[in-house]
């Protein structure tokens, strides 16, 4: 019996050795202290496969800056990989930087507001948020400097955000257009502050030049007759009335409404569609 047990043990050990183990790593976590935000912030970095394979330091990579990295880092890196492999590869390989959120309302909204999603203010509602300019300084003046110093970056930068993150993307696109090359806003919370940014946008797109900049907007279109949110009405007006005005000033944009997706389910379908439209190309811009 002892001999039998010893033979089984040796077999198990041998079998275990025959299956070598290796971690699957899609990125690394880093921390930094932000002088602008006055707090420590965490971010994640994904490097494409070719980054370490060919050893060519002359090859440079665009950078995707992802808001809410704790929620979307894994999804975005996976979709990016699928668009950069094989014969149908159309998208350039990118470094992906996921910024982990701490206080989303504070960091991602452009104005202080007490307005609710239905455009009303109730007794006891307090103003909150409104520090997105500070977060933008952290992103473009601190974090980007670290990324550009540590990695082989090309100087081309893409900004991606969902919900409040999408609102942040649109605010930067409209008011600090030069800071990024491509902007991807997924179901942006344009209802914020009773749609203040959407109202300001019409005058901005009439006068500002948007040459060499690209905007994508994905909108969750699933009907919700049980609520009175102003979100869909604001988004439809922004897509159909505001953005077309900017085409005369070089505004290049793509958009899609997803009738079967809600605010929570839209990020992944919109990521896929954004890369399809921006990098593979469609015949009609804005549709």
Image (spheres, helix red, strand yellow):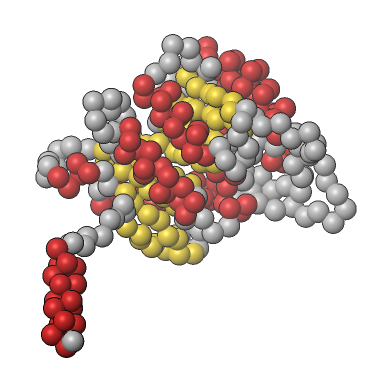
Q: Is residue 75 visible?
A: yes
Along the viewing direction, whichever of 213 and 90 lies nearer the viewer:
90
Displayed quadrant of residue 34 = bottom left
The residue that appears at 79% across and 38% down in the rendered structure is 227
Q: Nearer the viewer, residue 62 or 20?
A: 20
Outermost residue toward the right in this view = 123
Residue 108, relative to residue 249: is it above or below?
below
- Above or below 3: residue 71: above
Residue 259 location (% of width, % of height): 62, 27
Quarter of the figure with the N terminus? bottom left
217 to the left or right of 231: left
Which residue sits at x=63%, y=37%?
262
- Left/right placement of residue 252 relative to residue 63 reads right
Query: Residue 197: image x %, image y %?
Result: 65, 34
The answer to whether any part of residue 201 appears in the image is no
Q: Give the x, y percent position of residue 250.
A: 47, 16
């Amino acid at each position: 019996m002892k001999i039998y047990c010893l033979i089984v043990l040796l077999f198990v050990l041998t079998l275990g050795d025959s299956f070598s183990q290796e971690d699957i790593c899609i990125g690394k976590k880093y921390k930094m202290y932000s002088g602008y935000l006055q707090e420590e912030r965490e971010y994640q970095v994904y490097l494409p496969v070719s980054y370490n394979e060919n050893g060519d330091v002359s090859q440079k990579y665009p950078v995707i800056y992802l808001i809410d990295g704790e929620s979307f880092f894994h999804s975005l890196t996976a979709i990016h990989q699928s668009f950069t492999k094989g014969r149908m590869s159309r998208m350039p390989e990118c470094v992906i930087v996921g910024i982990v959120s701490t206080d989303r309302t504070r960091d991602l909204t452009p104005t202080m507001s007490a307005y609710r999603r239905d455009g009303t203010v109730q007794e006891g509602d307090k103003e909150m948020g409104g520090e997105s300019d500070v977060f933008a300084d952290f992103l473009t003046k601190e974090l980007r400097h670290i990324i550009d110093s540590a990695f082989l970056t090309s100087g081309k930068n893409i900004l991606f955000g969902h919900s409040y993150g999408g609102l942040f993307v649109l605010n930067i696109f409209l008011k600090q257009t030069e800071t990024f090359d491509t902007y991807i806003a997924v179901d942006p919370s344009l209802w914020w502050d009773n749609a203040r940014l959407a109202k300001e946008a019409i005058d901005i797109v009439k006068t500002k030049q948007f040459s060499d900049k690209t905007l994508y907007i994905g909108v969750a279109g699933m009907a919700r007759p049980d609520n009175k949110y102003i979100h869909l009405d604001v988004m439809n007006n922004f897509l159909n009335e505001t953005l077309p005005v900017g085409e005369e000033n070089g505004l290049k944009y793509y958009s899609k409404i997803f009738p079967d997706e809600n605010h929570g389910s839209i990020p992944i379908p919109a990521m896929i569609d954004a890369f399809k439209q921006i990098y593979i190309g469609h015949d009609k811009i804005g549709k």
